[in-house]
Amino acid sequence: MTGYSVEEYVSDIRAIVAEESETKAITDRIKPLALKLASDPSWFEDKYRYTDPDQGVGLHLLHEEENHDLAVFAIAWAPGRGVDAHNHKTWAVVSGIEGQEHEINYNRRDDGSKPGFADLVATKEETLYPGTAVCCLPDDIHSVRNNGDKVAVSLHTYGRHLNHTGRSTFDVDAKTETPLILKIEE
């Protein structure tokens, strides 16, 4: 008997996006499907554990729509590695597959009207493990770090491929916001 496939997951998401117009409703409906796929070993390959030695992350594209809407990745994080505060400018659902990822969520205290400036305050911390998932809305800001001693792998589903969203990275201490020009290489 075959498990739940990436293709079935994508098909289910397409149906949800066609039925729903509210972002939170979309992510709430995708979350249990992400958990279902993340817990099914039938599609998972050893290569998804690979991390670039310099960057400490491995981005493994599983699916992307031709128009760049809907992108699904298996993302691997080396121990102690991650990404600083950033936004996605699209919805996201992330589900743990292996290991653990520590996430810090931030609220923006300024109104965003001053280019290059962002005053952030940490509001919530949680660690994502296999069998858990988190949802992000387009303006949510968070950082992610593998706080374990083994490679962490998670399933990332985005409403639009991050190379096409106009996202930003933030320096919490310096109170800066910088457009993220770096492209994700698959």
Image (cartoon, helix red, strand yellow):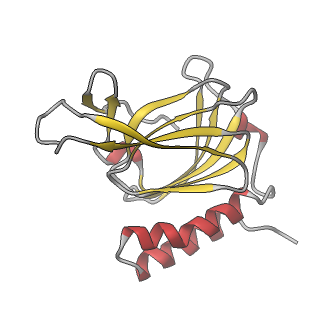
Where residue 135 appears, as percent x and y from the top left, is 50, 57
Closer to us: 80 or 12? 80
Image height of 78 relative to 4, above or below: above
Name the residue at 48% across, 30% down.
Answer: 83
Q: How many marks?
A: 0
Where residue 131 appears, as percent x and y from the top left, is 72, 56
Where residue 134 appears, as percent x and y from the top left, is 55, 55
Which image quadrant is residue 40 in?
bottom right
Q: Is residue 156 left or right of residue 110?
A: right
Name the residue at 67% across, 25% down.
Answer: 79
Name the residue at 49% across, 73% down.
Answer: 14
Where residue 74 appears, as percent x and y from the top left, is 62, 46
Q: Is residue 27 left or right of residue 69?
A: right
Closer to us: 98 or 16? 98
Q: Is residue 3 left or right of residue 121?
A: right
Q: Which part of the image, by quadrant, shows the N terminus?
A: bottom right
Image height of 32 relative to 125, above or below: below
Name the residue at 62% across, 62% down.
Answer: 34
Which image quadrant is residue 59 in?
top right
Closer to us: 109 or 90? 109
Seen from this angle, which residue lies furthest top? 54
Closer to us: 19 or 7? 19
Seen from this angle, which residue lies furthest right? 1
Image height of 1 relative to 78, above or below: below
